[in-house]
Amino acid sequence: MRQTRIAVRSATSAKQAADSVGLQVSIMKEQNSAIQESAQATTISAQAAKASADALVGIERAWLVPETERPQGIPLGARVSFKNYGRTPAWVTDIKLDFRKFPDGAVGPIDYSLVEGMQARHGWLLPPGIDSRTYYKRLESTGRLTETEEYAVRDGSLLLVFFGKLEYRDIFATRELKWCYCFAPNLGWILCGTPEDNEWT
């Protein structure tokens, strides 16, 4: 009889211990779930904060856009200016321009290491809403086209390509602007080249 009571007490103690462990496991699961939810909420908040910061930079940064003149006839030179469409000033630190003939109606890829730049020690300040000075580049070598080349330009077998790279800074970062325009009879300058030849950062 005594042994039976001892066995019952032992079984009861074991059940209580098991119940206690089960309760602790349940509490731990709830705590782990709360921690995971908190971590997810923190991640979402961080992502939202980054998106908000990126949006602010996108709104407030300097945005320089190249603007060209529509040529009258087949151009032997090209002009470009830049306008700051952003909300903060830009400091232009280097500009590279070139105007070349590309045979076979194909462009690039463009190697800017072969193009001489016009570096500025302290940069040219370009405030928001303001146009820069106009830059001019004459067609490579002689600056002239032969009669045969003029016919080739008209039929598209010879491309006249005006391209360049502008480096500038704003209050957020150092940036780079690349553009590549081809002359098309009756249309003027149109974008051409690879995506890397028309890249804004």
Image (cartoon, rainbow, N blue to C red):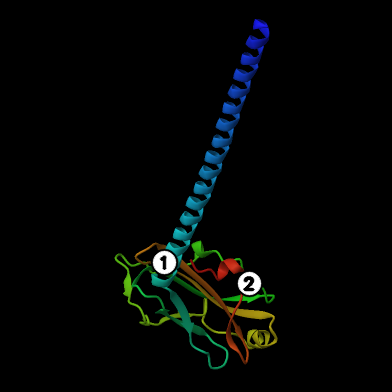
Instruction: Name the residue type under label 1.
Output: Val
The residue labelled by disc 2 is 107
Q: Can the viewer see residue 62?
A: no
Q: Earlier in the sequence, mark 2 or mark 1?
A: 1
Task: Examine the rendered structure and indicate whether residue 39 appears above or below residue 1.
Answer: below
On the picture, is 59 further left or further right than 188? left
**Residues under numbered marks 2 and 1 in contact, where contact means CB atoms less than 8 Å apart:** no
Instruction: Name the residue type under label 2.
Output: Val
On the picture, is 134 further left or further right than 71? left
Q: Can the viewer see residue 30?
A: yes
* SS label for mark 1: helix
The residue labelled by disc 1 is 57
In the rendered image, which quarter is residue 124 located in?
Answer: bottom left
On the picture, is 47 further left or further right than 146? left
Residue at image point 49% right, 88% down: 69
Q: Position of residue 118 (x, y in %)?
A: 38, 69
Q: Residues within 10 Å of mark 1 (few under 14, many from 20)?
A: some
Farthest residue, direction front: 1
Between 53 and 184, the one nearer to me in the picture: 53
Between 166 and 141, the one nearer to me in the picture: 166
Task: Examine the rendered structure and indicate whether residue 44 appears above or below residue 169.
Answer: above
Residue at image point 37% right, 63% down: 172
* SS label for mark 2: loop
On the picture, is 158 further left or further right than 31? right
Measured in 3D between alpha carbons, the distance from the residue under mark 2 to the one under mark 1, in whole angstroms, is: 34 Å
Query: Which quadrant is the N terminus positioned in?
Result: top right
